[in-house]
Image: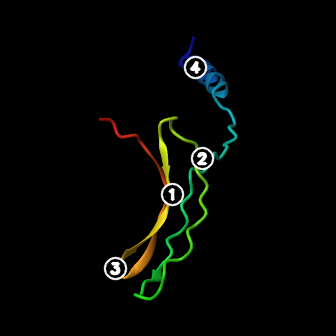
Amino acid sequence: MSKTTVFLSATAVAGLALAGCSHTTTREIVTPAPTATAAPPTVIVATPNTPPPAPRIETRPPSPGHEFVWQNGYWTVANGQYQWVPGHWEAPVVD
């Protein structure tokens, strides 16, 4: 066999082998499911005569266990402003 025939044969075999490797992939964008969403921070100036706003209505996420206790959210004062502290599940105290 001549060098040209060997080269053409090798090129043809390589081309066929690589042709089997090509494929088209459809990419799917997967967005994770939202977890417990916290409301954006609300800034309300706290003055001595201004009571805190009404408590927010929160959706409780599923309990992590039957012994956990839900602590409701509440307003607190920090730097002269009312800030909402979201509710959360609290683990039991073990003696």
> Which mark's residue is nearer the viewer, 4 or 3?
3
> Which mark's residue is nearer the viewer, 1 or 4?
1
In this view, the residue farthest toward the left is: 95
Q: Earlier in the sequence, mark 1 or mark 3?
A: 1
Q: Amino acid at mark 1?
A: Asn
Q: Amino acid at mark 2?
A: Pro
Q: Earlier in the sequence, mark 4 or mark 3?
A: 4
- Residue 26: percent from left, percent from top: 70, 40
> For the residue carrying disc 4, how many other residues have a C-alpha within 10 Å: few (<14), some (14-19), or many (20+)?
few
- Please name the residue shown 65% across and 47% down the image: 29
**Residue at numbered disc 3:** 79
Task: Give the Cα distance between marks 2 and 1.
Answer: 27 Å
**Residue at numbered disc 1:** 72
> Which mark's residue is nearer the viewer, 1 or 3?
1
> For the residue carrying disc 1, how many other residues have a C-alpha within 10 Å: few (<14), some (14-19), or many (20+)?
some
Q: Earlier in the sequence, mark 2 or mark 1?
A: 2
**Residue at numbered disc 2:** 32
- Residue 28: percent from left, percent from top: 67, 43
- Asked which secondary structure carries label 2, the reply is loop
**Residue at numbered disc 4:** 10
Task: Give the Cα distance between marks 1 and 4.
Answer: 74 Å
Q: Earlier in the sequence, mark 3 or mark 2?
A: 2
- Please name the residue shown 47% across and 79% down the image: 43
Residues at circles 1 and 3 in contact by the CB criterion of under 8 Å: no
